[in-house]
Amino acid sequence: MTFNKEKFESIIETTIANEAVFEKAFTHRSYLNENPEINTSNERLEFLGDAVLQLLSSEYLFKMYPNSPEGDLTNFRSAVVCTKSLAHDARRLGYGELLFLSKGEETSGGRDREYILANTFEAVLGALYLDKGLDFCRQFTEKNLFYKVEQIVEDETYKDAKSKFQETAQEKTGITPYYRVLESWGADHEKTFRVAVYLDEEQYGVGEGKSKQKAEQSAAKNALDKLTSV
């Protein structure tokens, strides 16, 4: 495979100087297994890109929401830089087509795998920082990621399901929800939990997850759907 420089430049709407660093940004670690002459994946660039993203997202939110407390800004940032969000925009930009993957990763759908796309978004941002500087990265993220911030804040999608359900339940019923583990199964290192959430003694939702916290979030989401439909 050869890095498609022209396609990438059309995506970012500018030229690049250091083609090698962007080739590295699109090299998934699985590719190294079948190409021993390649000894580095995109993980170091991902580390750098994550730091750049934390800075730029914090700066953007700090300026955009001057009256919001630190806790809200943290929640806004978590929502916009989460794996799902980064993967969405990496997919939209066509990063998956440029990836260097092993044959196994390729055939199992790696080009559209959420965590691979999200990690690639960060790795490319790290490469952009090295090649184009911080100001370009600021413009790039504002156009290709932060555009969704206002909608996230307006729709309150930065709030997790438990927080939303508790707020809605207290507003509609005046009751604080509580959670109860119904059952769990599996080996200690890979247990699955089924959890229910209640208002008084009425069960409003049930959810499953690989941890109690994930099961509670799932139960809260189902409960929220029920509560808002009545």
Image (cartoon, grey):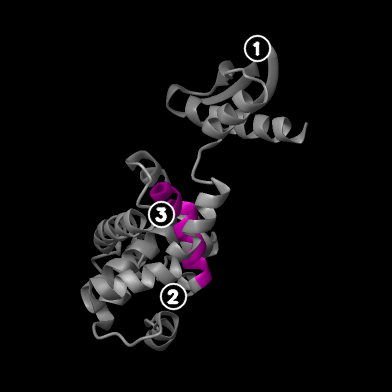
Q: Quadrant of residue 201?
A: top right
From the image, tell me which residue sits under label 2.
98
Q: Tell me the quarter of the image containing the N terminus.
A: bottom left
Residue 71 image point, x, y percent: 36, 39
Q: Residue furthest right?
A: 230
From the image, tell me which residue sits under label 3.
81
From the image, tell me which residue sits under label 1.
200
Q: CA distance from mark 3 to mark 2?
A: 21 Å
Q: Secondary structure at mark 1?
A: loop
Whether residue 171 can be seen here: yes
Q: Are marks 1 and 3 in contact (CB under 8 Å)?
A: no
The residue drawn where x is 42% and y is 48% is: 76
The residue drawn where x is 30% and y is 64% is: 42
Mark closer to the observer (3, 2): 3
Q: Are marks 2 and 1 in contact (CB under 8 Å)?
A: no
Does residue 150 sit above or below 206 in this rendering? below
